[in-house]
Structures are given as C-alpha cells and as structure tokens.
Image (tube, helix red, strand yellow):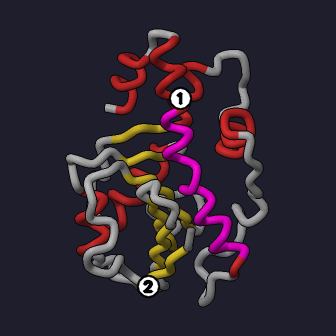
Amino acid sequence: MAVHFHEEDLPEGVLTGTSAIAVDTETMGLITHRDRLCVVQLSDGSGDEHLVRFGPGSSYDAPNLEAVLGDPSRVKIYHFGRFDLAAIQYYLGVNAGPVFCTKIASKLVRTYTDRHGLKNLVEELLGENISKQQQSSDWGGPVLSEPQRDYAASDVRYLHRLRDELIVRLEREGRMEIAQACFD
C-alpha cells in the first residue's frame, strides 16, 4: 500500500483499468466558484492511493485525470459526492459519473442513526478508525504535510469496502433501486 503524489495531473497510464474509482477532493473552502480545488484523491481499490495537487494559478489542464474521471464505463465512488462532483465539474470541466455515493447509501439503510459522516461509517461498518484532524487545514499551501497526505489518502482508502457493505444492506432492505435513482 502506497500513497503516490502527483503535481497538476496523473502520469500517463495510471489508473487506466476498468474497475470502480474512489474519488474525493480537497478545496480551500465550501463555495465552489470562490474556493479553489487543491487536491483530487483517487484509488482503484488495489491498495494504492493517488493524490493530484493543483497549485495556485493552475490552469487545471489535466488530460490524464480528466480521462479517468470522465470515463462513463467506470463507477466513481464518493462520500458526499455532490460537493466533489461540483468541484470537479467547475475546475476540470468533467462530469465525473456514474456515481455511487456512500453518504446517500448510508442515509437509505442506516435509518437508525443520524451519523452518516465518513468517520462514522468507517468505524461502524469496517471497524477502522480514521482521523479527521486535517480536514480543515490549508490545502492551498506550497507543500502538503505528511499528515495532510495521509488524511487525503484515507478519504478514498475505505470507499470500495464501504460500497460493498452498503450494497449488501441496500439489497437486503430492498432499497437498491431507489439508491440508484438518487445516484443517477
């Protein structure tokens, strides 16, 4: 398992398979048109995570990343995908679907709780603990610290396993069709 760091784009040939891709973003804030996209994190579930950092003044010309995100044959797994999809569309000009959103799936099958954050899901469904300490750090700085890189990688590290568990629960509760309608 390794975290690979890239500036401005994925290298050619990286993540070019056919499996689902876990995707997350880090931005300077929550207002898409004001708060720039700083990092896109990806994982194909094989154990490695890839972080693509965009510097201040970036042109967001990332053809390899755009090809992976824009591939309509590959499902993109998100947690609270609505935010990530908006940032990717605005900055990279890519419709990064089809989508599976673990937060939507959680709300449909974990109706016994109001705790649908990634940390809660990973803890309950996978028995793992992730730190959210770096969530509100400065993602636009000139260097990403090791704790920031670890945090960013952890945001995609568990999404494949979460999706698998949530699909089991969606099917068990007869809610897969409504989930797919929400994702679409």
Q: Is residue 156 above or below residue 124?
A: below
- Report the mark closest to the observer, 2 or 1: 1
- Find disc 1 in the rendering and name its residue: 166
Label 2, secondary structure: give it.
strand
Marks 2 and 1 in Cβ contact (< 8 Å): no
Q: Is residue 46 left or right of residue 125?
A: left
Rendering coords of residue 163 (x, y %): 49, 37
Residue at horizontal 47%, vertical 70%?
50
**Residue at left 45%, top 16%?**
171
Residue 110 lies left or right of residue 67; in this view the side is: right
Where is residue 75, by image quadrant?
top left
85 left or right, relative to 83: left
Q: Dividing the image into 4 quarters, which one contains the C terminus? A: top left
The residue indicated by pointer 2 is 7
**Is there any visible trace of residue 34 in the rendered image?**
no
Q: Judge whether 97 appears above or below 136 on screen.
A: above
Looking at the rendered structure, the kind of residue marked 1 is Leu
What is the quadrant of the N terminus in the image? bottom right
Q: Real-space Cα distance between discs 2 and 1? A: 33 Å
Please provide the residue range marked out in magenta.
147-164
Whole-percent x and y of residue 101? 47, 38
Q: Residue at x 32, y 51 (%)?
A: 19
Give x and y (percent) for residue 123.
74, 40
Tell me the element at label 1: helix
Q: Quadrant of residue 183?
A: top left
